Amino acid sequence: MLRDMHLNKIITLILLSGFVIPLLALLYVSYCGDGDITSCLLKKEDLMPDFYWHYNTIKYISIYGNLPDYIIAHKDGGLDGASADGEMKPVFHGPPYYYLGAGMMILSKFLKLNSLLTLHILSLLLMLIANFITFLLFKRLSKHVQNKKLFIISAVSLSVFLPLHLYIGIAIHNHALFYLFTMFSFYMYVAFLE
């Protein structure tokens, strides 16, 4: 019992670190001295693949309530994501992330929060949930190894601090929800096999 409590404290620390470290990095890049978080973030968003494609899709859904067929891909599409001229790209990803993001955008505007920062934090929260499910998966799998505690701590640490996972946690991209569903599917598959 005491060993489980100690393990849970270590895992909690790992999971929280996997949330807080990218959050601090996000807050750091959201400050550039001019006082506007959105403009600071938009100066750096080109580093993220297809940022405007995803961001414009979320803005469009938050205004019109449905998924567009095409959206402006490589620059800001205005208030609704489709008001500016530019290269159009088809929207072919599954819609759950975009509807969730649109809901967060509407809520953030209602609460007078920065909607761009809120969308980044949404991805962080999705990754936190995914990392927790990953912990549950590795805990379940640990019954098949000798050193259960070492296996769980090592596997969860590797998964949480994998650079790609830290990156997905701050990106406005549907990969955060995809990863959550993937880990949940693996967990359910292992549970089914037992």
Image (spheres, rainbow, N blue to C red):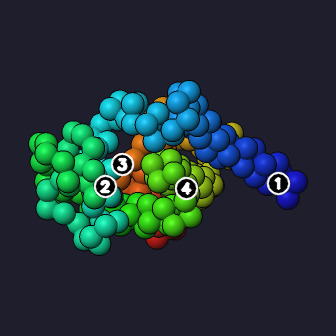
Dividing the picture into quarters, in which one does residue 25 lie?
A: top right
Density class for disc 4 (Cα within 10 Å; few <14, some 14-19, many ≥20) is few
Q: Nearer the viewer, mark 4 or mark 3?
A: 4
The front one of 173 and 37 is 37
Q: Could you give the CA–CA distance between mark 3 and mark 1, rounded to whole angstroms?
A: 35 Å
Q: Position of residue 72 (x, y in %)?
A: 18, 48
Query: Where residue 121 sits in the image (x, y, percent)?
Result: 53, 50
Of circles 3 and 2, which is in front? 2
Tell me: 142 left or right of 149: left
Q: Would residue 99 appear left or right of 57 to someone viewing this image?
A: right
Provide the residue designation for mark 2. 79
Q: Disc 2 versus disc 1: distance between alpha carbons?
A: 49 Å
Tags 2 and 1 in contact by the CB under 8 Å rule? Answer: no
For numbered disc 3, what is the local secondary structure? loop
Q: Which residue is mark 3?
A: 173
- Asked if residue 55 lies left or right of residue 30, the reply is left
The residue beneath circle 4 is 113
Between the C-alphas of marks 4 and 3, the distance is 20 Å
Tell me how far mark 2 sits from mark 4, CA to CA.
16 Å
Give x and y (percent) for residue 40: 46, 33
Vertical placement of residue 143 versus 161, above or below: below
Q: Secondary structure at mark 2?
A: loop
Q: Disc 3 residue type?
A: His
